[in-house]
């Protein structure tokens, strides 16, 4: 397991913990709101009983306590409806000046739909009275404004927290990416600087050897390798800058890579070129793009264990050019299609896992293209695709 997998596992655990905390918060809030709703129902039952007492009271009855209960409701919306469905009274409801009757009737229907209804009988002994003679009133009520606010508050709170978390994560990732870029660029330029002196010395020694042994082909190949080192140092020096792409013949760029690698790979590796019949011109920084193809080819060679076929094909449409690098290696599982481009990912015992990450950076940031795993099948091979604008 490489370090990226561990980081992902930690992230998943943290996300699960956050989800559990949010769920528990909502559960606790729901239980609290349920208790408050029951309390408000009890208050309305007391209020209803006070209303019944008020309607049945005679002139000599002391209604001080009853009126105190009735007037004490300043938060819960209430509508009193008689037996015939006529609205007798309402409290704590803002009624528009026009269409007030229809508005109140809509409120009655809404309260009744939520089962916020209490029926009180005005007679003391209902069982002894004929059903059509029973007089009653229905009291419809709604949740108080405070209860409604409490019901929505947990969701608003979670939303605000989520926004702050997203902003914080974005800020951390941006600063982390900027720091990584600085390290990346600094390391690349320092590598180019360190390579400069020994390469210059090697170039001088090769020239001396060429002057003394003019017919030795090995010295010529040594010169090619030294020139290759010079090219690699030049590539590293360009990391962090934005080199201007130039129109290049794509087939020639691909041939340069294949010709170089084919002479330095095992004889059991076969390179297959599947180019278009007509030349394809693409804006490239040729040295950096050759680096991309070289990394893909080396990755394919490693996956095949030094024996197999590496195919490079070129296709196009009206606007884009497609370069496919395929092999007959061990393949990549579908879950790793994106992971292979992350820095540090490698299946080899030796290596830093930067080849494909570097290729992705060069293609997407410097050439504004795309690179991805087009298809892969375990133990059969992999196809990497590069898309570039014409």
Image (tube, grey):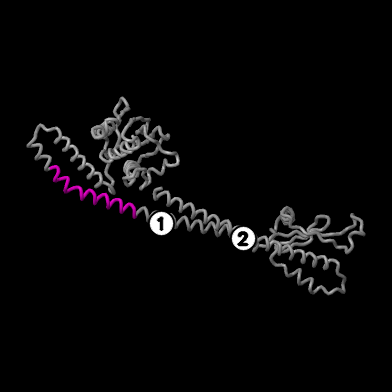
Q: Which residue lies furthest to the top in this view?
A: 277
Location of residue 286 (image quadrant): top left
Location of residue 176 (image quadrant): bottom left
Indicate left or right for 166 with 76 as reference.
Answer: left
* Disc number for residue 146: none
Q: Does the magenta stretch include residue 197?
A: yes
Q: Where is residue 335 in the image (x, y as percent from the top left)?
A: 45, 41
Q: Where is residue 241 in the image (x, y as percent from the top left)?
A: 27, 48
Residue density around tag 1, few if under 14, some if 14–19, many if 20 or more, within 10 Å? few
Q: In this view, does 370 lie above or below 178?
A: above
Q: Position of residue 95 (x, y in %)?
A: 70, 59
Residue, disc 2: 29
Residue, disc 1: 172
> Which segment is the magenta one?
179-203
- Nearest the viewer among 38 and 56 is 38
Residue density around tag 2, few if under 14, some if 14–19, many if 20 or more, within 10 Å? some
């Amino acid at each position: 397991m490489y370090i990226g997998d561990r980081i992902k596992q930690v992230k998943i655990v943290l996300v699960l913990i956050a989800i559990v905390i949010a769920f528990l918060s909502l559960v606790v809030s729901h239980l609290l709101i349920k208790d408050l709703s029951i309390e408000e129902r009890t208050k309305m039952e007391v209020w209803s009983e006070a209303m019944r007492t008020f309607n049945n009271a005679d002139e000599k009855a002391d209604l001080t306590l009853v009126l105190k209960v009735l007037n004490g409701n300043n938060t819960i919306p209430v509508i009193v409806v008689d037996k015939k469905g006529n609205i007798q009274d309402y409290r704590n409801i803002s009624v528009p000046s026009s269409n007030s009757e229809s508005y109140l009737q809509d409120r009655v229907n809404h309260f009744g739909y939520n089962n916020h209804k209490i029926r009180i009988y005005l007679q003391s002994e209902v069982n002894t009275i004929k059903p059509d003679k029973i007089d009653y009133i229905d009291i419809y009520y709604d949740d108080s404004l405070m209860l409604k606010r409490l019901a929505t508050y947990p969701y608003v709170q979670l939303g605000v927290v989520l926004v702050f978390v997203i902003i914080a994560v974005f800020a951390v990732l941006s600063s982390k990416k900027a720091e990584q870029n600085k390290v990346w660029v600094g390391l690349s330029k320092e590598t180019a600087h360190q390579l400069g002196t020994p390469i210059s010395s090697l170039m001088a020694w090769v020239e001396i050897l060429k002057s003394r042994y003019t017919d030795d082909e090995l010295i010529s190949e040594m010169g090619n390798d030294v020139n290759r080192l010079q090219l690699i140092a030049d590539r590293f020096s360009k990391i962090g800058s934005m080199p201007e792409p130039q129109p290049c013949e794509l087939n020639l760029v691909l041939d340069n890579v294949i010709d170089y690698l084919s002479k330095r790979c095992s004889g059991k590796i076969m390179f297959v070129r599947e180019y278009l019949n007509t030349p394809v011109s693409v804006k490239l920084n040729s040295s950096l793009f050759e680096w991309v193809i070289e990394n893909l080819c080396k990755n394919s060679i490693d996956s095949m264990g030094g024996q197999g076929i590496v195919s490079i094909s070129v296709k196009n449409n009206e606007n884009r050019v497609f370069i496919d690098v395929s092999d007959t290696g061990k393949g990549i599982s579908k879950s790793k299609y994106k992971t292979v481009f992350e820095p540090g990912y490698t299946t080899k015992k030796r290596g830093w896992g930067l080849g494909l990450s570097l290729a992705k950076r060069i293609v997407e940031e410097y050439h504004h293209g795309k690179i991805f795993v087009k298809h892969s099948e375990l133990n059969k091979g992999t196809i990497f695709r590069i898309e570039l604008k014409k």
